[in-house]
Image (spheres, grey):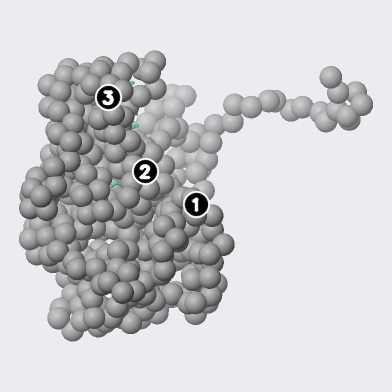
Amino acid sequence: MSDVAKLILDGKEYEFPITVGSEQERGIDISTLRARTGHITLDQGYGNTGSCQSAITYIDGDKGILRYRGIPIEQFANGPNFIEVAWLLIFGRLPDETEYRSFADELTHEANIDEGMRHHFDSFPRKAPPMAILASMVSALSCFHPEFMDLTDEERFCAAAARLISKIRTIAAFAYRHAKGLPYIYPDPNLKFVHNFLHMMFSMPYDQFICDDLVRDALNLILILHADHEQNCSTSTVRMVGSSQANLFASCSAGIGALWGPLHGGANVAVLQMLEKIHNGNLTPEEYVKLAKDKESGVRLMGFGHRVYKNFDPRAKLIGDIANELLPRLGVHDPLLDIARRLEEIALEDPYFIERNLYPNVDFYSGIILRAIGIPTDMFTVIFAIGRLPGWIAHWWEQNQAPSRIARPRQIYVGNGMTDYTPMPGRK
Ligand code: SDX
């Protein structure tokens, strides 16, 4: 295969080098295009545009492959805990016992938040969206941890990463407790990451939450499966903001905002709302699928489709397996799971979805599990953010390690030509 691409413009031929990735992905390097040809490319939604070279996560959307630092996600199904995988994503290899212990101990030690931050929660309205609180309070960490504004050395970066991964749990749990009018439950240093989070969510001062190992392991795997996904919308946002040398907390807060959208991480909430609408008798699964195929309806089969996966999202399969195992073991029969399975059955046999390569994605079944654990719908995307945070941190650090330029895309202007200002009195 050629190692250059040729472009003919106005009779002149230009050559551009082709970059080949470690999995043989090929990209035309157009970094000199505008200087040499006066042209830019246009690619709405960046479906054909690589923003960077990255060594963190590999996806093959046609084969349904997802690997973190080369390790297939299927191999995480019965093994590591979320913190070990977070370390892998951020530092590029699995930690040894000492490294893991030191990182885990730092998370335990740094789980609490400044009392000044805790008081902020009291000023949010009870019905404030938890994602709004999460974005605000993650950004507010910049106020309470000025020592982490400048992260040039790895040791200080590692300390900031540990604090952020640990405290986002506490912030999330406090947001939930505030919404419920419940007392804040402080982190317990004797509990591991997931258990400690569920403790802060569900314990009472007089009644410690008992964590079922199955629930702990299910949530641990869900966080792992959400941990990174190469240049998705929120991760690209974190890289974009980080490219201006904005600090880690501000960059991840921006990622939370991007994740909130229903086309992205907010889809897990939209899936539950879709299933509840069907369950409440408004529509049958067949009627809903029919609507989702009708462009005029503005309805989509939420939790289906993906920009990259044109095959099964490997995470959806693993999360579907968790749902199949967890709910019966908890003695939970959720009619929404039956509806989800029926929707999947119908869609996978329907030419509309088959022709467009639309399959269940990571969000299709995750909400069913979170609901069975007792996590309310408006906290689903918050859980996604807790899971995705190590990926955002890894990409922020990868970008800041390499000499990079501020991200600044171009545009094709389609507005007014030169226009004079007309003073107010003369205006019609
Ligand atoms: C996540 O990027 C990532 O990696 C994201 C993520 C991650 O881990 O970070 O994987 C997490 O965001 C998963 C996606 C969650 N979103 C949803 O489940 C929302 C429902 N899905 C869609 O809106 C859509 O599939 C997207 C947003 C996920 C992907 O959109 P694309 O790639 O821009 O696809 P498209 O909108 O161009 O659709 C192509 C065709 C269109 O039909 P035609 O114009 O060709 O006739 O497929 C149709 C679309 O109308 N289509 C759907 C559909 N998704 C696409 N039709 C009905 N229901 C759907 N869900």
What is the three-letter code of the residue carrying label 1?
Answer: Ala
Give whichever of 50, 277 is nearer the camera: 277
Residue 284: image x %, image y %? 23, 21
Inter-mark Cα distance, 3 to 2 = 24 Å
- Dot 1 or dot 2: first in sequence order is 1
Residue 246: image x %, image y %? 51, 63
What is the three-letter code of the residue carrying label 3?
Answer: Gly
SS of the residue under disc 2: loop
Residue 170: image x %, image y %? 37, 68
Kindly indicate the quadrant of the structure image that contains residue 385: bottom left
Residue ID at (27%, 71%) = 207
What is the three-letter code of the residue carrying label 2?
Answer: Gly
For the N terminus, the quadrant is top left
Q: Which residue is denoted by mark 1 in the rendering? A: 128
Inter-mark Cα distance, 1 to 2 = 16 Å
Residue ID at (29%, 58%) = 387
SS of the residue under disc 1: loop
Q: Which residue is denoted by mark 3 in the rendering? A: 281
Disc 1 C-beta below 8 A from ligand 1: no
Instruction: Please indicate, yes or no, whether residue 195 appears anywhere in the rendered image.
Output: yes
Give whichever of 305, 44 is nearer the camera: 305
Q: Nearer the viewer, mark 3 or mark 2?
A: 3
Disc 2 C-beta below 8 A from ligand 1: no
Give whichever of 68, 8 is nearer the camera: 68
Q: Which residue is denoted by mark 2 in the rendering? A: 266
Q: Are marks 3 and 2 in contact (CB under 8 Å)?
A: no
